[in-house]
């Protein structure tokens, strides 16, 4: 087994295990921490694919900022109360069955797509990756973002601004954090 | 070794190197603790630990024995797994991030080139920022796993602070990245070799008696970066996480013995990363005042008259230069801690979001405009 193959199988194992524990853990905090673990191991897989910048940004933005906020908010909840609210009642039962359906659909889909990729010959894949002729991934990424797709990039920025303003407006209505219930 | 390891020899060398740099880092912690306690005594006009051994140096050994032999204690209401996992994880981000900082010029032997650095990563800055941002998890795990209100409040404060100041930290070095046009720390240091000289409007300006360091190009970036690293490592004046008047000791209230010491090591590791990055970005990294490594090598060659010995000597000289810079910044960390009072929480957030972030953004835009103007417009 070459070093590359070993790294791939090792990281894939960690990613799959932590990904599964996101949905299988009963405690939401463990789920959130497993999700952070999944993101870090995906970043490590990016490194083995030589997409260093993407890996770094994945760790900074998703694992280092977004998931920390998730975990912070989860720690403020009364977890037992939330668990009870989601473990009884017909509506949540239907939700559970629906999410099981979606999860199994995702797994079946991933396996099918994986098999079709595995069916293609390795020469075909190498040709597909070499056609890009990418050397400096950071530079090519920024060229794609700021030269080719500048309009879409700016539009996404405006969209995020709208979301931020909307969130502030929603949290401020009805007295915001100073409201008494 | 330049590559990550294909042959057995490379893998062994890389593993040994990682171990040595980790040990260097951990060994520096007792010295820093001693320096901090003696230094605080000096600043506050008292003695500090001075009884055990010469100048109190053996006090740390006694402390380590005390920490190791303390009763192992975990709170009943807490989450045992998280409680024990947090201090172990606290060591990882600091150690992994410090490996990416180059400590000296590469050591050249006839067959191999050994980098004096844990590993050379093409996007060094992004890697270090990413890995050290993971430290927020260890604090949250400690705070939540302790099952105590003080710990949780301390952890929430600390992680909110880390996330807030990460923005200012990241933006303050964009100017440096624009200036050198690379994410690679070694290339950044190479750009700072020699005397001060730069091209502007078609002219070359030079002052060879000054070093070509980043601080002369990015003074505002330097101040913002240094201030943000204080917040990142949870040191005074930003140690709201452990405001002892309000929160007992913050996220490590329930920790004792060696578990608390591991949080300590994590904090000092963050200080070392911050000091190493300060030296790398703004003070020429391992390079010696307005000299290029080639000049240093030539001087060494003239001294010992053998290529091998000159190589080793030049590596050592550059390592000493880096260590001196590191030590100066670590001392500034300690001096500031024992000089400035603590911020109030709203002042901390105001400083981060309303002062440092706009200034960092302005610095980025101004740097971009100036680089564009001085490169593309030629006068005369």
Image: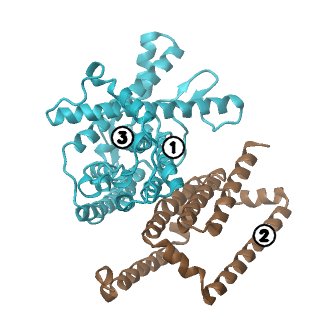
Q: Position of residue B106 (x, y in %)?
A: 52, 29
Q: Position of residue B295 (x, y in %)?
A: 41, 24
Quarter assignment of residue B192: top left
The residue that label 1 is drawn on is: B96
The residue closer to the viewer here, B218 or B194, is B218
Mark-to-mark CA distance, 3 and 1: 15 Å
Secondary-structure class at tag 1: helix
Q: Chain of mark 3?
A: B
Does residue B286 appear left or right of residue A13 in this picture?
Answer: left
**Chain B shade:** cyan
Q: Chain of mark 2?
A: A
Q: Chain of mark 1?
A: B
Secondary-structure class at tag 2: helix
Disc 2 to disc 1: CB gap under 8 Å: no
Q: Earlier in the sequence, mark 3 or mark 1?
A: 1
Chain in brown on the image: A
Mark whose residue sits in front, 2 or 1: 1
Mark-to-mark CA distance, 3 and 2: 48 Å
Which residue is at 83% across, 56% downward?
A123
The residue that label 3 is drawn on is: B275
The residue that label 2 is drawn on is: A113
The residue closer to the viewer here, B129 or B141, is B141
Does residue B153 appear left or right of residue B44 in this picture?
Answer: right
């Amino acid at each position: 087994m070459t070093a590359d193959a070993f790294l791939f199988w090792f990281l894939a194992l960690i990613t799959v295990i932590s990904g599964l524990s996101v949905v299988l853990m009963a405690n939401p905090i463990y789920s959130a921490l497993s999700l952070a673990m999944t993101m870090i191991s995906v970043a490590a897989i990016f490194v083995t694919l030589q997409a260093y910048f993407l890996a770094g940004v994945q760790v900074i933005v998703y694992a280092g900022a977004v998931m920390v906020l998730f975990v912070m908010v989860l720690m403020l909840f009364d977890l037992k109360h939330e668990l009870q609210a989601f473990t009884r009642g017909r509506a949540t039962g239907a939700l559970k069955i629906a999410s099981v359906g979606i999860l199994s659909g995702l797994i079946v889909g991933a396996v099918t797509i994986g098999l079709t990729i595995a069916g293609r010959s390795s020469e075909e894949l190498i040709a597909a990756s070499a056609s890009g002729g990418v050397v400096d991934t950071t530079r090519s990424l920024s060229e794609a973002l700021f030269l080719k797709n500048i309009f879409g990039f700016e539009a996404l920025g405006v969209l995020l601004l709208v979301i931020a303003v909307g969130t502030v407006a929603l949290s401020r209505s009805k007295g915001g954090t100073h409201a008494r219930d | 070794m330049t590559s990550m390891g294909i042959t057995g020899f490379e893998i062994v060398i890389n593993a040994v190197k990682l171990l040595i740099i980790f040990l260097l880092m951990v060994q520096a912690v007792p010295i820093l603790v001693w320096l901090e306690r003696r230094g605080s005594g000096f600043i506050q006009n008292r003695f500090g630990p001075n009884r055990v051994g010469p100048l109190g140096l053996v006090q740390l050994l006694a402390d380590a024995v005390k920490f190791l032999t303390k009763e192992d204690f975990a709170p009943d209401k807490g989450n045992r797994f998280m409680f024990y996992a947090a201090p172990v994880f606290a060591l990882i981000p600091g150690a992994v991030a410090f490996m990416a900082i180059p400590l000296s010029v590469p050591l050249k032997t006839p067959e191999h080139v050994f980098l004096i650095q844990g590993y050379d990563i093409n996007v060094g800055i992004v890697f270090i920022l990413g890995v050290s941002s993971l430290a927020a998890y260890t604090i949250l795990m400690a705070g939540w796993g302790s099952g105590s209100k003080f710990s949780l409040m301390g952890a929430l404060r600390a992680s909110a602070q880390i996330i807030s100041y990460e923005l200012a930290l990241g933006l303050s070095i964009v100017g440096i990245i624009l200036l050198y046009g690379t994410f690679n720390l070694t290339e950044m240091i190479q750009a700072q070799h020699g005397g001060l000289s730069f091209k502007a409007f078609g002219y070359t300006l030079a002052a060879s008696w000054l070093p070509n360091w980043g601080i002369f190009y990015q003074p505002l970036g330097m101040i913002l970066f240094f201030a943000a690293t204080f917040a990142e490592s949870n040191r005074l004046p930003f140690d709201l996480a452990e405001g002892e008047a309000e929160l007992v000791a913050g996220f490590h209230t329930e920790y004792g013995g060696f578990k608390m010491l591991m949080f300590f090591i994590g904090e000092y590791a963050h200080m070392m990363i911050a000091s190493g990055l300060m030296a790398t970005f703004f003070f020429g990294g391992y390079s010696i005042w307005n000299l290029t490594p080639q000049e240093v090598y030539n001087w060494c060659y003239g001294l010992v008259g053998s290529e091998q010995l000159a190589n080793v000597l030049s590596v050592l000289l550059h390592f000493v230069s880096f260590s001196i810079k590191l030590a100066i910044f670590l001392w500034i960390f300690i001096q500031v801690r024992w000089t400035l009072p603590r911020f109030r929480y709203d002042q901390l957030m105001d400083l981060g979001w309303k002062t440092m972030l706009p200034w960092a953004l302005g610095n980025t835009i101004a740097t971009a405009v100036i680089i564009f103007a001085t490169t593309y417009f030629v006068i005369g």
